[in-house]
């Protein structure tokens, strides 16, 4: 069943994670400049006093929030008790460990899942009851192109992002009848701070990997310039302006308020087409199998 989502008020209250740089900071500034209320968050606000001052001078608030903290949902409960109704939750906080799957330690994999799967889910589960009661809300998850088609060395990161993407598809159907929408944003390579929030795995690379794509990606992370591998193609401010407009239904978002997926960045065209090709190939190759294994 298709649902038409209705925005009952023009000015919204946004709770955004990971606001000390990149997408989070850009979206915070855009929402504030358009007259919305923004609760910006980061793990260590004391490290960016100038940004805290900037946001608060525009009428926003800056709170300490570590999405890995199992008590993080209390931030939402405190805001709601104080009368600040969270209309838009943006799950943006994250980091990346670049490591081939076989070399990833369990701690590294669990760390990625904690920050980019369990952390966002804790906030989602806390905010949905309030949104459902009010019959309005938007949940925005900043995903990654790596979650779609896979990318060497990005297994733990892609797995965490893909996990959140998958459960959000189910959530979207469950909450749509209550005028709550989800938007999964899948960016490609952008000029964010992701390079500084990215680290190699702890285990050394075996000689077998020398010259592989995994090896080249890690060389780029270390500062090498290798054609065809780069961390930045898109403009983060242009990207977040698009996200803002899709959420509020203005500009390029007008008439697209019900869309659940937004691909961002020119590199995502080829990457999305590779997924289409991947699925199409499977359907064609196994067309004599797929539809012939049902109970007779």
Image: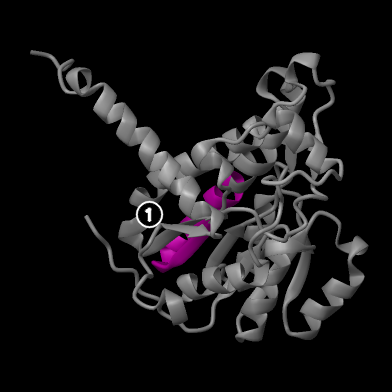
Region of the chain picked out in magenta, as a range? 121-140
Residue 174, horizontal then vertical, whole percent: 35, 49
Q: Which residue is mark 1?
A: 175
- State which quarter of the image contains the C terminus: top left
Q: Is residue 132 magenta?
A: yes
Q: Residue at x 75, y 52 (%)?
A: 194
Q: Is residue 251 magenta?
A: no
Q: Is residue 43 left or right of residue 118?
A: right
Q: Nearer the viewer, residue 94 or 238?
A: 238
Secondary structure category for the residue under label 1:
helix
Q: Residue at x 54, y 51 (%)?
A: 124
Q: Nearer the viewer, residue 199 or 71?
A: 199
Residue 55, horizontal then vertical, whole percent: 77, 77
Residue 182, horizontal then vertical, whole percent: 44, 57
Quadrant of residue 6 within the rendered picture:
bottom left
Q: Residue at x 73, y 23 (%)?
A: 104
Q: Is residue 164 above or below residue 37?
A: above
Q: Is residue 150 above or below residue 192?
A: above
Residue 241 can be seen, yes or no? yes
Q: Nearer the viewer, residue 242 or 248?
A: 242
- State which quarter of the image contains the N terminus: bottom left
- Please tell me how many numbered marks the rendered image carries: 1
Q: Residue at x 27, y 29 (%)?
A: 283
Dominant secondary-structure state across the stretch colored magenta: helix
Residue 251, horizontal then vertical, whole percent: 45, 81
Q: Is residue 250 left or right of residue 214?
A: left
Q: Residues within 10 Å of mark 1 (few under 14, many from 20)?
A: some
């Amino acid at each position: 069943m298709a649902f038409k989502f209705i925005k009952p008020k023009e000015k919204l209250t946004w709770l955004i994670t990971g606001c000390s740089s990149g997408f989070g900071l850009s979206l915070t500034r855009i929402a504030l400049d358009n007259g919305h209320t923004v609760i910006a968050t980061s793990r260590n606000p004391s490290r960016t006093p100038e940004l805290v001052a900037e946001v608060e001078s525009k009428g926003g608030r800056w709170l300490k929030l570590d999405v890995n903290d199992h008590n993080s949902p209390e931030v939402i409960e405190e805001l709601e008790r104080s009368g600040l109704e969270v209309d838009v939750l943006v799950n943006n906080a994250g980091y990346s460990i670049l490591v081939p799957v076989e070399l990833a330690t369990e701690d590294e994999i669990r760390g990625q899942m904690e920050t980019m799967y369990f952390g966002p889910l804790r906030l989602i589960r806390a905010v949905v009851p309030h949104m459902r009661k009010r019959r309005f809300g938007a949940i925005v998850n900043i995903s990654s192109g790596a979650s779609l088609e896979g990318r060497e060395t990005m297994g733990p990161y892609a797995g965490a992002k893909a996990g959140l993407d998958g459960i959000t598809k189910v959530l979207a159907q469950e909450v749509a009848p209550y005028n709550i929408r989800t938007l999964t944003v899948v960016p490609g390579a952008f000029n964010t701070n992701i390079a500084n929030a990215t680290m190699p795995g702890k285990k050394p690379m075996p000689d077998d990997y020398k010259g592989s794509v995994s090896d080249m990606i890690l060389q780029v992370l270390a500062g090498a310039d290798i054609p065809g591998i780069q961390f930045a193609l898109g403009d983060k401010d242009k990207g977040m302006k698009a996200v803002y407009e899709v959420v509020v239904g203005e500009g390029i978002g007008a008439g697209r308020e019900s869309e659940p997926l937004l691909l961002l960045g020119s590199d995502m065209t080829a990457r999305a087409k590779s997924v289409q090709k991947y699925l199409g190939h499977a359907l064609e190759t196994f067309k004599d199998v797929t539809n012939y294994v049902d109970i007779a």
